[in-house]
Image (tube, helix red, strand yellow):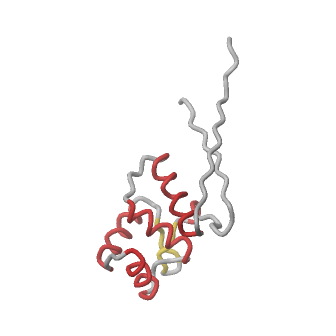
Amino acid sequence: MEPTKIIVQRLKKGVENDLLLAEKYYSILSVINNLHLTEREIQLIAFTSIKGNITYANVREEFCKLHNTTSPTINNIISKLKKIGIFVKEAGKVKVNPVIVLNFNSDLTLEIKIVHE
């Protein structure tokens, strides 16, 4: 029996700030897990992860201005993301599920294994 070959491919991508780093991370999670998240959904997840929550009006308003969108659009996205477990409600605040929240203030190294089942 031939030994299994492990193929390692290293990729490096520079980003300008923590928000863009978070967007890249959540984009990768979406693709790997076949979540089919839209660009706006990924933007909201990344923004919420960095801000801590998306509950308060001023935080929602900041997102709307940054991405030229509306509050009803955000509400629809929040509803969808809560249904699939990406957003959770803790202590009355809508947050990103803590399982997928990272510190985006520093560099991020991901190890992704795609295995045969």
Left or right: 85, with 113 as reference point: left
- Is 23 or 87 nearer to us in this picture? 23
In the rendered image, the residue lying farthest to the top is 1
Q: Choose top left, top right, bottom left or bottom right for residue 104.
A: bottom right
Left or right: 8, with 80 as reference point: right
Q: Is residue 55 above or below residue 76?
A: below
Residue, x 46% and y 78% (percent of image)? Answer: 54
In the rendered image, the residue lying farthest to the left is 72
In the rendered image, the residue lying farthest to the bottom is 58
**Residue 8: percent from left, percent from top:** 66, 35
Quadrant of the snapshot with the N terminus: top right
Q: Is residue 47 above or below residue 36?
A: below
Q: Is residue 77 above or below residue 8?
A: below
- Is 80 or 69 nearer to us in this picture? 69
**Residue 20: percent from left, percent from top:** 53, 65
Q: Choose top left, top right, bottom left or bottom right for residue 51.
A: bottom right
Residue, x 53% and y 80% (percent of image)? Answer: 91
- Is 45 or 39 nearer to us in this picture? 39
**Residue 77: percent from left, percent from top:** 35, 68
Left or right: 53, with 37 as reference point: right
Residue, x 58% and y 67% (percent of image)? Answer: 16
How many callouts does the rendering have?
Answer: 0
- Is 12 or 87 nearer to us in this picture? 12
